[in-house]
Every structure is written in C-alpha cells, then in structure tokens.
C-alpha cells in the first residue's frame, strides 16, 4: 500500500497543477519536483529515523530490514520487517549482555593454563 499512497498523491498533485497551469508545463514540473523531493525525504530520512528511534534500531538497519523483508516475503515481508528486526535486536542485545557478564568473557575459569 505504500506505493498506492505515493502514486495517488502524485497523480492528484500533478493533475491539479496541470488543470490550474494548463499551457505552462514548467509549473507542473515544479509541482512534480517538490512532491518527489518531499516524498524522498519522507521515505529515506524521516521515517527511518523516527521508526528507528522507537524500536532502538539504526536507520540503516531499518532500511535493510525493509528491503530484505520485501525481497524475501514481498508485501508481507515489508509489513513485518521492522517488528521482526526489533525482536532480533532485543535478542542480540540480551545475548551480548549475558556474554559480557559471563566468566568466559571476563577470563575467570576459562580452562586455560595459569
């Protein structure tokens, strides 16, 4: 559904601009450019940063999760990509914390020669 919103909004914006500025196509191109820049900023800057802060993931991990989810499972993968990556992140942080608390990490009773 993300594509439908983008395409729908772009078609309405360009259609209204074409209707209002009929013979002048340069103004229609400006409207399309402003819409494209705004959509790109929303998709690649704002959304990953805002969603990443909420689930404690770096924006690049959010983008990677969305791309990988889309490739692996299509639309369903895109829908579940961020929650699944958040769960993986929580499990990884828990495992790293447990490892750093272990005697093996601290070097006590590592089974080596003294």
Image (cartoon, rainbow, N blue to C red):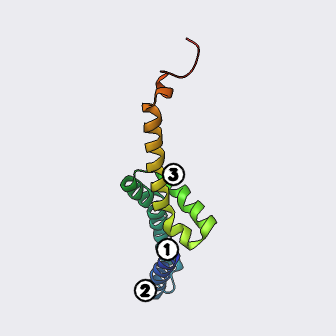
As drawn, 38 above or below 45: below
Query: Callout 3: helix, strand or loop?
Result: helix
Q: CA distance from mark 2 to mark 3?
A: 40 Å
Residue drawn at point x = 47 percent, y = 52 percent: 59
Crowd around label 1: few <14 · some 14–19 · many ≥20 (10 Å): few
Residue under pointer 1: 2
SS label for mark 2: helix
Which residue corresponds to mark 2? 20
Query: What residue is drawn where x is 58% and y is 13%?
Result: 113
Q: Position of residue 22 (x, y in %)?
A: 49, 87
| 10 Å crowding of disc 2: few (<14), some (14-19), many (20+) | few
N-term-proximal mark, 2 vs 3: 2
Q: Residue at x 55, y 56 (%)?
A: 64
In this view of the protein, can residue 58 be seen by the observer? no
Separation of residues labelled 1 and 2 (CA atoms): 27 Å
Name of the residue lying farthest toward the top? 114
Q: Is residue 25 visible?
A: yes
Q: Could you tell which of marks 1 and 2 lies nearer the N-terminus? A: 1
- Rendered location of residue 60, percent (x, y): 51, 51
């Amino acid at each position: 559904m993300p594509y439908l919103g983008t395409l729908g909004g772009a078609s309405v914006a360009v259609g209204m601009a074409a209707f209002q500025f009929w013979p002048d196509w340069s103004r229609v191109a400006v409207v399309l450019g402003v819409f494209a820049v705004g959509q790109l900023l929303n998709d690649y800057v704002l959304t990953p940063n805002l969603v990443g802060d909420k689930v404690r993931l770096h924006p690049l991990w959010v983008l990677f999760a969305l791309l990988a989810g889309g490739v692996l499972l299509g639309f369903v993968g895109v829908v579940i990509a961020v929650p699944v990556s958040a769960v993986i992140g929580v499990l990884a942080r828990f495992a790293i914390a447990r490892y750093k608390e272990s005697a093996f990490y601290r070097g006590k009773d590592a089974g080596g020669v003294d």
